[in-house]
């Protein structure tokens, strides 16, 4: 599945099921060129073969795991009447009826779809918030979002986020051995059209739905790529439904037993994959660790908190505050605090949940951050499920690092600023940021 990267990049979704997925719409960086220069003795080959697009709004953090709130229309209406004057009144209902009558009488085009008219009302209400992370989900879109948070991928094996400058969807990461990689898609590619349909103004959910489709069918993306004189038409063959491998790890060759662990996003499957990877690295007498969060769009808040509890000392991991000032804290008991040198790799596509982890590590001075400033998504979305099977995903709170920083629109600055050298990676297969991380760790390992 195409995971919306909440740039928007994947967001923090709080599914209080209440939890949401990795928003979309945080929610990435080219995972093809981020391989550690052939040093990693791992399971790259075949590990993620056939994976589909995973959409990620810039950084998604989800809260919860099962399913959100069941909200009845009558209860919602009663609450609205108690707290404020509802916009749903005789005047607005009459105007809606008038608009419908005019459409049915005069619209010259395809036959009017009643369901689309109805959904247009709901989508319009949410769109009026001017919040790229808040969305109305149809039944099908909700199911896709839940699959995404569970680590289910379907599509071409790429991460999609929103390019904030151009307000267009963008490829923020490409999975190893995926259809997207085989087709030649790259991080930073702007998706101008999908099968000839303009994407301007579309939500990430909509773009992802266009990219996805039946296994072995083709999708054509019209791409703007910096440096190219014209648009590129790239055809990819959709893959099949599989569970996403969100963690890649191994001991780097020709080092003093330095471990490498990449987390591509935070899904419900990530915690077990992370714990297994750490156990294997420790069994190989790991003396230092490179934690690669580059282009990680975010995902499940519960997942990133569980991962943080395997690295951080006792104390606060992150806290959220809603519009009423209600604060919710997520803490760590320090039982599994990492006791070896740590470097964290970040970039401008690291968003939401990945920023929570990087921010906590920085606040506790548990590791050295190398790369570029992160995306800057410091808000949380929650999925509110309605009785008819549809849902609203709404921004409900802001999150703060242990020291009280909200990084929304700001991001987290690295301790060592270092741009990724794409030419070096492409021509010589060397990841300059990983090499710098090795240098830093070698100087700290006793």
Image (cartoon, rainbow, N blue to C red):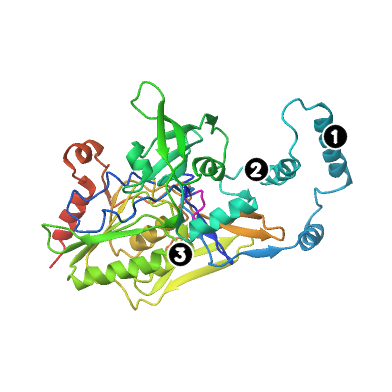
Q: Main secondary structure of the magenta part?
A: loop
Magenta segment includes 268? no
Q: Are marks 3 and 2 in contact (CB under 8 Å)?
A: no
Q: Measuring from the top left, give residue 418's x and y in whole percent.
A: 26, 44
The residue beneath circle 2 is 127
Which one is earlier in the sequence, the residue at label 3 or at label 2? 2
Q: Is residue 231 visible to us here? A: yes
Q: CA distance from mark 3 to mark 1?
A: 47 Å
The residue beneath circle 1 is 101
Count the labels in the image: 3
Q: Residue at x 37, y 54 (%)?
A: 264
Does 238 appear above or below 73? above
- Crowd class of label 1 (few under 14; some 14 to 19; many from 20; radius 10 Å): few
Q: CA distance from mark 3 to mark 2?
A: 29 Å
Q: Which residue extends farthest top?
A: 229
Which structural element holds mark 1? helix
Q: Is residue 21 visible to us here? A: no
- Crowd class of label 3 (few under 14; some 14 to 19; many from 20; radius 10 Å): many
Q: Which residues are magenta?
A: 21-25
The residue beneath circle 3 is 268
């Amino acid at each position: 599945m195409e995971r919306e990267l909440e740039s928007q990049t994947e967001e923090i979704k709080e599914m209080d099921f209440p939890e949401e997925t990795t928003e979309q719409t945080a929610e990435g960086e080219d995972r093809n060129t981020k391989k550690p220069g052939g040093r990693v003795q791992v399971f790259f080959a075949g590990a993620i073969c056939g994976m589909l697009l995973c959409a990620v709004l810039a950084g998604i953090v989800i809260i919860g795991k099962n399913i959100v709130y069941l909200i009845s229309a009558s209860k919602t209406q009663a609450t609205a009447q108690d707290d404020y004057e509802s916009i749903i009144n005789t005047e607005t209902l009459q105007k809606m009826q008038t608009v419908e009558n005019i459409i049915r009488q005069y619209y010259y085009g395809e036959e009017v779809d009643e369901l689309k008219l109805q959904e247009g009302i709901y989508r319009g209400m949410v769109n009026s918030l001017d919040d790229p992370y808040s969305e109305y989900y149809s039944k099908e879109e909700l199911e896709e979002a839940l699959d995404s948070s569970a680590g289910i991928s379907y599509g071409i094996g790429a991460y999609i986020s929103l390019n904030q400058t151009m307000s267009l969807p963008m490829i923020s990461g490409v999975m190893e051995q995926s259809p997207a990689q085989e087709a030649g898609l790259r991080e930073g590619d702007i998706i101008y059209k999908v099968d000839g349909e303009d994407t301007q103004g579309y939500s990430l959910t909509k773009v992802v739905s266009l990219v996805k489709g039946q296994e072995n069918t083709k999708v054509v993306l019209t791409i703007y790529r910096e440096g190219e004189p014209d648009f590129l038409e790239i055809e990819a063959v959709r893959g099949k439904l599989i569970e996403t491998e969100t963690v890649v790890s191994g001991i780097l060759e020709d080092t003093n037993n330095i471990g490498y662990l990449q987390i591509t996003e935070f899904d419900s499957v990530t915690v077990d994959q992370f714990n297994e990877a750490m156990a294997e690295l420790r069994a190989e007498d790991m003396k230092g660790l490179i934690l690669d969060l580059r282009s990680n769009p975010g995902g499940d808040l519960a997942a990133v908190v569980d991962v943080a509890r395997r690295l951080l000392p006792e104390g606060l991991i992150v806290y959220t505050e809603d519009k009423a000032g209600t604060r919710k804290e997520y803490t760590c008991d320090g039982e599994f605090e990492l006791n070896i040198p740590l470097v964290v790799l970040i970039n401008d596509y690291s968003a939401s949940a990945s920023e929570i982890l990087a921010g906590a590590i920085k606040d506790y001075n548990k590791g050295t951050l190398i790369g570029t400033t992160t995306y800057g998504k410091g808000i949380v979305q929650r999925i509110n499920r309605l009785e008819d099977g549809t849902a609203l995903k709404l921004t409900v709170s802001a999150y703060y690092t242990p020291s009280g920083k909200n990084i929304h629109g700001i991001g987290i600055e690295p301790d060592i600023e270092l741009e990724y050298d794409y030419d070096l990676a492409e021509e010589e297969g060397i990841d300059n940021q990983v090499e710098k991380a090795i240098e830093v760790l070698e100087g700290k390992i006793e």
